[in-house]
Image (cartoon, rainbow, N blue to C red):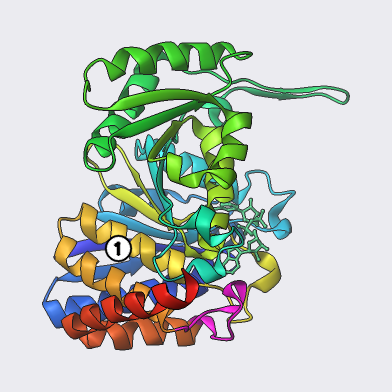
Amino acid sequence: MINIVVLPGDGIGPEVTAEAVACLRQLSTERDLGLRFTEHDFGGVAIDKHGHPLPEATLEACRNADAVLLGAVGGDKWNDAAVRPEAGLLRIREELGLFANLRPAKVLEGMQDISPLRPDISRDADILVVRELIGGIYFGERTRGDHSASDLCTYSRDEIERIAHVAFRAATHRRQKVTSVDKANVLATSKLWRETVTEVAKSYPGIELEHMYVDACAMAVMTHPRRFDVILTENLFGDILSDELSVIGGSIGLLGSASVGSGGPGLFEPIHGSAPQIAGLNVANPAGAIASAVMMLDELGLSDSGRLLSSALDVTLLEGCRTGDLGGSATCTEFGARVRENLRSGLTRVDAYRELIAMNRGCCG
Ligand SMILES: NC(=O)C1=CN([C@@H]2O[C@H](COP(=O)(O)OP(=O)(O)OC[C@H]3O[C@@H](n4cnc5c(N)ncnc54)[C@H](O)[C@@H]3O)[C@@H](O)[C@H]2O)C=CC1
Ligand SMILES: CC(C)CC(=O)C(=O)O
Ligand SMILES: [Mg+2]
């Protein structure tokens, strides 16, 4: 039995998570994976019910799980809460020791039509952001007075080393390049970051390392996305850059992520937030939540099943079944149902997918 804790959270979180879980349930039944799901309160909904975004019972369930699947948390409703939903998110990442957040962003071959970038710029873009997740300014001491406020940014050499190793190891399975992003012309933490990453790189002689300032990087990912393979960066910069990178593929609703640490359960969540404006309307794109489920299957050692789900997701998009954020009219539930239909038809659809790619290359290339 594989024990998966589901934290639907707030806003569109429950809607997109429901579609991902339905895909996983179907896969589990068809392929006898033994996935078992239990839902727990987390985020704003947990504040309403229990007075805290991360109740002890939820944390305990996550600690004992094989993996955690999360929707999103937050919303203006909880702006004045003593502990906000987002603080619960930071805490669960810290409690589970999830220092590495992996956020792949790519343009699906045959789908350059939905990228706002010119096809000659976006074609073949395929970037993995490796973001440090439990250090830096989000975790530093905060002060707030009437006329001033401060947030402390701290990184230790150890924290930088361990995330750098994740990035270099990832690059060895990809295109052998790491771009380390910092602001070392100004920040002390960035100077230490650059120095430490340069040192770690010596253990990976086959990997090309370049350093880039975050402002220049924010521009270059839009003008020359193909020049990037793995982007290694700290918590705040990675948060911002990964939302920006979602533009390349066409929508933030497409991107999933995996947060992993040193051996405990991983946490898998789309990179977007709770999108309160569209919550309850059944229009959210569940692709990012489903992509997160694919990453979860990989992490659980169920890569064959992950590949099937990933293909079913790609086929669904290539067929033109798209939610409003991608210019389509499919609802969240219709999109999820279509992914499951494609999943049901299994391997034959992978061939269909390749054919669709070949066809689309002609008209969108
Ligand atoms: N991991 C998490 O739980 C995160 C939570 N948040 C929280 O979410 C709340 C809303 O934050 P925002 O800054 O508005 O960011 P957001 O990511 O929720 O929304 C940004 C824009 O993208 C759209 N969008 C996001 N996901 C979508 C999807 N799956 N399908 C279609 N459109 C989608 C939204 O409608 C909005 O226009 C805040 O309370 C914020 O703190 C924000 C980011 C991450
Ligand atoms: C609470 C925030 C740090 C969440 C967020 O924006 C993210 O992790 O992408
Ligand atoms: Mg973010």
Q: Is residue 221 visible?
A: yes
Please say if 40 is above or below 211: below
Q: Is residue 272 visible?
A: no
The quadrant in which the N terminus is found is bottom left
Say whether residue 297 is magenta.
Answer: no
Where does label 1 land, which residue?
294
Identify the element where label 1 is drawn: helix
Q: Which picture quadrant has residue 326?
A: bottom right
| Residue placed most toward the observer, 354 or 132 | 354
Q: From this viewpoint, which residue is outermost toward the right? A: 147
Query: Residue at 54% across / 71% down in the picture?
Result: 113
The x, y position of residue 36, in whole percent, is 23, 69
Crowd tier of the residue under label 1, counting other residues whose Cα lies within 10 Å: few below 14, some 14–19, many 20 or above: many
Q: Which picture quadrant has residue 315?
A: bottom left
Query: Residue at 63% across / 81% down in the picture?
Result: 281
Query: Residue at 30% across / 68% down in the picture?
Result: 310
Please say if 316 is above or below 67: below
The x, y position of residue 156, in whole percent, is 43, 15
The x, y position of residue 182, in whole percent, is 53, 24
Residue 160 lies left or right of residue 119; in this view the side is: left
| Residue placed most toward the observer, 269 or 102 | 102
Q: Amino acid at mark 1?
A: Val
Please say if 313 is above or below 266: below
Say whether residue 330 is magenta.
Answer: yes
Does any atom of ligand 1 lie closer than 8 Å to the CB of label 1? no
The span picked out in magenta is 320-332
Q: Which picture quadrant has residue 170?
A: top left
| Residue placed most toward the observer, 361 or 82 | 361
Residue 39 lies left or right of residue 350; in this view the side is: right
The x, y position of residue 120, in whole percent, is 51, 57
